[in-house]
Image (cartoon, coloured by chain):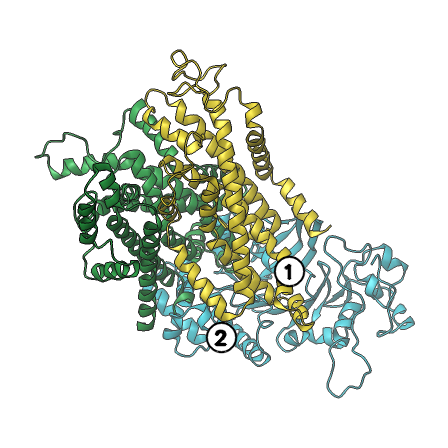
Amino acid sequence: MSEAPLLELRDLRVTYTGPDGTARAVDGVDLVVGAGETVGLVGESGCGKSVTALAILRLVEPDGHVGLGSSVRLEGRDLLALPLKELRHVRGNHVALIFQEPGAALNPVLTVGAQIAETVREHQKVSKSDAWARTVEMLTLVGIPEPEVRARHYAHQLSGGMRQRVLIAMALACKPRLLIADEPTTALDVTIQAEILELLADLQRRLGMAVLLITHNLGVVAGHTRRTAVMYAGQIVEEATTGELFARPAHPYTEGLLAAVPRLGERRERLAAIPGQVPPATAWPTGCRFHPRCPYAWDKCRGEMPPLLDLAPGHKARCWLVQEPVRRTERGPGRTAAPPHGT
Amino acid sequence: MTGFAVRRLGAALVTVLAAVTVSFTLAHLAPGTPIIGDAERLRADPAVVARLQAQFGLDRPLPEQYARYLANAARGNLGESFVLRRSVSSLLAERLPNTLMLAGAAVAASFGLGLLVALLQARAAGTWLDGLLGAATLVFYSMPAFWLGLVLLIVFGQTLGWLPLGGMTAPGAPDDASTAARALDVLRHLVLPAATLALVQTAVVARYQRGALVDTLGEPYIRAARARGLAERVVLLRHALRASLAPVVTLAGMSVPALLAGSVLVETVFGWPGMGRLTHDAIQTRDYNLIFGAALTAGVLVALGNLAADLATAALDPRHRA
Amino acid sequence: MTPGAAAWRRFRRHRPAVLGAGLAALVTVATLAAPVLAPHGPTAILDPIALQLRPPSPAHPLGTDALSRDVYSRVLHGARVSLTVGVAAAALATIVAGAVGLAAGLLGPRTDAALMRSVDVLLALPRLLVVMTAVALWESLPLAALVGLLGATGWFALSRLVRSRVRELAAADFVTAAVALGADRLRLARHLLPHVGATLVVGATLDVGNIILLEAGLSFLGLGVAPPTPTWGGMILEGRSLMFNAPWVALGPGVALLLTVLAFNLVGDGLRDALDPRHRGAGLA
């Protein structure tokens, strides 16, 4: 892709101040999404991926604060510097966001059709009937049977899978160039999950839009993304094409995530979980943030935070092992790690 | 749908019945009866007293009196007032509209003003404006309505002389005055008593609605609406307010008892010829039929209020449609 | 930090609540120490000619009334009636509400339905009107009767709140555990009491204000505690006929009423925020 990226996050930082101190939820994230590309953002809860999604559309205020040096460029324009009126023009129109809990994102006292139609009318000066026609069209597109009838229903009258389809319809109604999907399948039954992911892939092909797929579930990114970034403790710790990431993970955290997924036919005495817990955002460990849980950690890791180092073209990892790969063989994965720092 | 209607009607009937029963029980438990009271004052012949009692059916056993009253009431006969020597229905017909006018104006004003205050507070949550409005609503909520009425009378009626000093119409108005002039006169007299009731009710509505709005604004669908690029005003009015309106409407419907109570005091302060004053007089003079008639009316009004609240809730919140 | 200590800290931080508590304390002191604080007796008729209907002055901070009595002293003594009735009736209502709420929550669906339906009906009756009618049962209303009436008509809404709290708690694990260990319903009620305590305390405090206003309203209508005991409502009634010549007669007791009710409402709000932070400004109990 030699064209300018659709979305470019540079040094994105988001902090929340509360009674327990200042939480650095997102702490220097760089990410690029090209036009029409599907990128995955993977991490456990508490790593800052959802906050990243919200920050792109400036939805973290007033509770959260975006760092002064951060920039979020959409086709070259910094969204963080836009006046609110223009930002509203981007929201729901050029960039759409779908949330984890489909039921919670729908207003219970308005029909689902009304909510889709109002979004259309907000961004495109069309008449009520045209907006309604578009609503029905979108509902058909996402595969909802009897769309004219369903449009007049309320959120509580629809099943979880249907609600998520409605949300997708609402997000795509104005044909955005970028769709940010935050855990789109987590709240759904397993059988529905696959359907929704297929739907997203299909729509993405048809509309040619880019998708930022945020999830904690590696299985979700496996078949559906071209590139994936792994997030831990507010930072990107590894980024590669998805195939490369699964085949040759460079960061111990990624290794741990992949190893933790049990595979059919494998025989093991115990599940290989990553030891320790995600630290609280108010107290990230010094040096490399993963070192308390890392099986390979040595002094340098405790003292110095590694930057994102290039392993191979298009493959980066935030780990000193990139410079000293020999240390990897000194210990292997699956062994107990050094005692967690400070716990 | 019919099940819904039948249940609501049943509930309404129970309410009305309860009102009548309670007043019946309490009134009859009170020492002394009207006739005897009168008789003692007039030193009448006991035989005459006995005849009067029989005439009014007061010598019958209580359950029989109760049953007869209910039977008559069902046919529209509410009896005659002992003291005022007029049919209860005609008295009620005369006074009820005045109270409805007063209470209606108060409800309309308090609802509108209360919502406005709540919206301002929710939008400015945490700022000085929120604090100021919150303090003001708290003060009015804690104020005795009858005293507020007096203060308003003194300030606006006497000191500033802008508004009349009580009653519903100016005494001595010419009989041939046009309807418009008479309506204006009544309106001028309505302002202060309605404002008194309304100010306290506004505080009630505002306090409740502010909380509901703040809660609603924290819901995920509000953030989702902002994420779709909707203007803040749309988010506030179309989404947040709509979603939080149902409870406060229920509150309004359920505040009929409080309004009835308030009207007793306010009507007394302002000399407004309404049902509140009528009820007060009836209780003081042990005017049974009038007491029961007033209780019946109160019961009906409360039942209507509850019904309206139920209907409005179903209309506003689709989750409540049975 | 224990939940109690955490709640106390939240209450202390809430400035309006602390202000309210201060005011309430002031009123309580006035009530208890009225005979000592008041410069004159409540019924003492001072110089009938020279001191009749005098506007506020240093000697008489709230002026004098038609019977040449010091309004300030009468206001102080009036506090006794208002506060006694308020607190006692609220306490009574709270006890009944707690009992009914617990019963409805713990004694099974039929009792629950029966009790709550009755409450629905009772809530339809205007409290003032019922009390007004009942007051007529006595020639001269004793204080205890007034407290009883106001308390007996004030538990309906609170019992509903208690019942829903009990229902909420009944689903909690510790209750299931207790039942599994063979706890009978009385014991369950004892276990649950501290948890519904917060609801009860908040409800009681907020009701004190309502009751004080009701008592004042009754006195204003001439139906309250019999004279010559000074009541704030009664004083406002006297002040009504004098409102144009001597507005201060009605002003003093009115402001006293406002401040007292405000105090209890502030404390009640603060308690509610402190004891149940989920309730962030969720309106009225």
**Left or right of C125, for residue A18:** right
Q: Nearer the viewer, residue A325 or B307?
A: B307
- Would you identify the image quadrant in which residue B164 lies? top left
**Going by the picture, which residue comes out furthest to the right?**
A330
**Left or right of A124, for residue B24:** left
Q: Position of residue A156 (x, y in %)?
A: 46, 69
Q: Which residue is mark 1?
A: C190
Q: Position of residue A41 (x, y in %)?
A: 66, 66
Q: Amino acid at mark 1?
A: Arg
Q: Which residue is mark 2?
A: A159
Q: Chain of mark 2?
A: A
Q: Amino acid at mark 2?
A: Ser
Please say whether residue A180 is visible from this viewpoint: no
* Residue at 56% in and 61% down: C102
Secondary structure type for disc 2: loop
Q: CA distance from mark 2 to mark 1?
A: 42 Å
Instruction: From the rendered image, report the letter of the chain displayed in green.
Output: B
Q: Are marks 2 and 1 on the same chain?
A: no
Instruction: From the rendered image, report the letter of the chain displayed in yellow.
Output: C
**Going by the picture, which residue comes out furthest to the left?**
B176
